Amino acid sequence: MDLLVEDGVARGVRLETGAELLIVPNGSPYSVGKTDERMQIAVARVVETGLPILYVNQCGGQDELVFDGGSFGLNGDHSLAFQMPQFEEAVRAVRENPAMFPLFVVDPHSGPSGLITTVNVVREETTLTAEEYMRGAVGQFPPDLGRAVSQEMVSLERYQAGRIILDLLDAAGVAAGREVVYLVRAGNAVYTITFFTGIDEFEARLPTFEQSIRTFTVREE
């Protein structure tokens, strides 16, 4: 797909086709600030659809144009999966994360943002506690893509969890969406559960999600 589609188009494609991954083959020439611009647009597409994205850019030269490569992948929770080098050819095998599955909610009475409301669940085996995992997640989030509004440790019915609220920024640096992230330590893994919607709809929709997350349970095999 084209990364520079109008807002709402990518979401419509996902709903119509049942797509599970966005792949963007591109020939984008290098210019100052282009790397950040690509990342911001890609994050917007992931936020809009809840789908992971592979951005594959050309590397080399053609006449006066220089293509810098710099391909990257974003997970469905818009975290950075990988980043390829610029100005050199490189190959990388990408393996789908079988522990991630997105759940989608579409409300016909959405606000003016038009952003789709999503819930993502990601499981990662780790030795970190929920609090350590939370500190690392906040520290790694790119400041030009969003900002942490709050972070705290909370008690669910069965688990301790980290809770983060993030504002996600559009290309102009304005907060367009807001999400709450729960980091639940269960067994040998941390489960990242993310609820996202438009910033103008967040407070109205949050209580329903908060009620549901209280009953989160991991089935023991």
Image: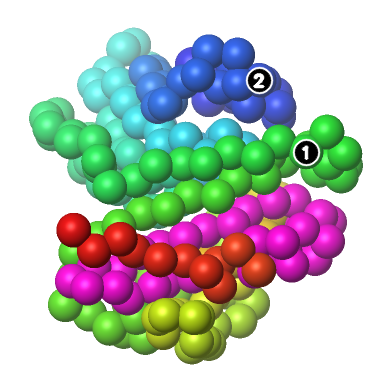
How is the model colour-coded?
Answer: rainbow
Residue with the mark numbered 1: 107
In front of the other: 50 or 98: 98
Amino acid type, mark 1:
Asp
177 magenta-colored: no
Residue 218 percent across, percent down from the top left: 34, 63
Q: CA distance from mark 1 to mark 2?
A: 14 Å
In front of the other: 203 or 8: 203
Residue 21 percent across, percent down from the top left: 40, 27
Which quadrant would residue 122 be assigned to in this image?
A: bottom left
Residue 196 percent across, percent down from the top left: 62, 54
Residue at (39% x, 73% y) in the render: 184
In front of the other: 1 or 97: 97
What number of labels is visible?
2
Which quadrant would residue 69 be assigned to in this image?
A: top left
> Relative to 134, is 220 on the left or the right?
left
Amino acid type, mark 2:
Gly
Q: Which residues are magenta?
A: 182-210
Figure quadrant of the C terminus: bottom left
In front of the other: 169 or 87: 169
Residue 90 vs 28, above or below: the answer is: below
Give the secondary structure at mark 1: loop
In this rendering, the label closer to the viewer, 1 or 2: 1
Residue with the mark numbered 2: 12
> Relative to 80, is 193 on the left or the right?
right
